[in-house]
Image (cartoon, grey):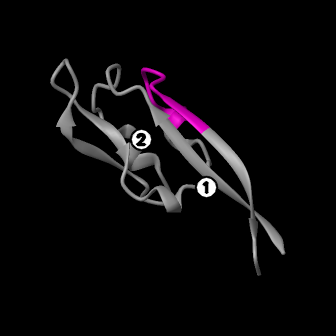
């Protein structure tokens, strides 16, 4: 058995202005801009492929409005 790091992000959807910097910064193509809009009319960032997230935090580092919180958890793999 091994341990794998699994990541997840939480986007403050109402604060996100849909600039897309996080989408470009993600090395694992996890993020996309939602087809939905927030109260201000912006397409906010969302996890399109959550299983691919490793919690690298690249998205959080580039977000100019600090809308993204990144979480990491250890997951036991059955290898």
Identify the residue at horizontal 59%, vertical 42% (top origin). 57
Residue situated furthest left in the rendering: 41
Q: Which residue is mark 1?
A: 54
Q: What is the span of residues highlighted in magenta in the rendered image? A: 60-70
**Could you tell me if the residues under marks 1 and 2 are in contact, i.e. CB atoms within 8 Å?**
no
Few, some or many residues within 10 Å of mark 2 (<14, 14–19, 20+): many
Measure how far apart labels 1 and 2 are at the Cα level. Answer: 14 Å
Location of the C terminus (image quadrant):
bottom right
Q: Which residue is mark 2?
A: 22
Of labels 1 and 2, earlier in sequence is 2
- Kindly state the secondary structure of the residue where label 2 is placed: helix
Instruction: From the top left corner, tell me how far across and down residue 33 is, in percent.
Output: 27, 43
Instruction: From the top left corner, tell me how far across and down residue 54 is, in percent.
Output: 61, 55
Location of the N terminus (image quadrant):
bottom right
Mark number, residue 16:
none
Quadrant for residue 78, please give it.
Answer: bottom right
Instruction: From the top left corner, tell me how far across and down residue 45 is, in percent.
Output: 34, 39
Identify the residue at horizontal 35%, vertical 19% (top origin). 15
Question: Does residue 76 lie above or below 14 as drawn?
Answer: below
- Of 57 and 34, nearer the camera is 34
- Of 26 and 37, nearer the camera is 37
Question: Does residue 59 lie above or below 49 as drawn?
Answer: above
Instruction: From the top left corner, tell me how far across and down residue 4 is, in percent.
Output: 73, 63
């Amino acid at each position: 058995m091994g341990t794998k790091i699994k990541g997840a992000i939480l986007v403050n959807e109402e604060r996100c202005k849909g600039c897309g910097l996080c989408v470009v910064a993600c090395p694992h193509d996890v993020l996309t801009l939602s087809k939905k809009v927030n109260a201000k009319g912006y397409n906010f960032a969302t996890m399109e492929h959550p299983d691919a997230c490793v919690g690298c935090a690249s998205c959080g580092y580039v977000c100019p409005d600090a809308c993204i919180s990144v979480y990491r958890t250890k997951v036991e793999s059955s290898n």
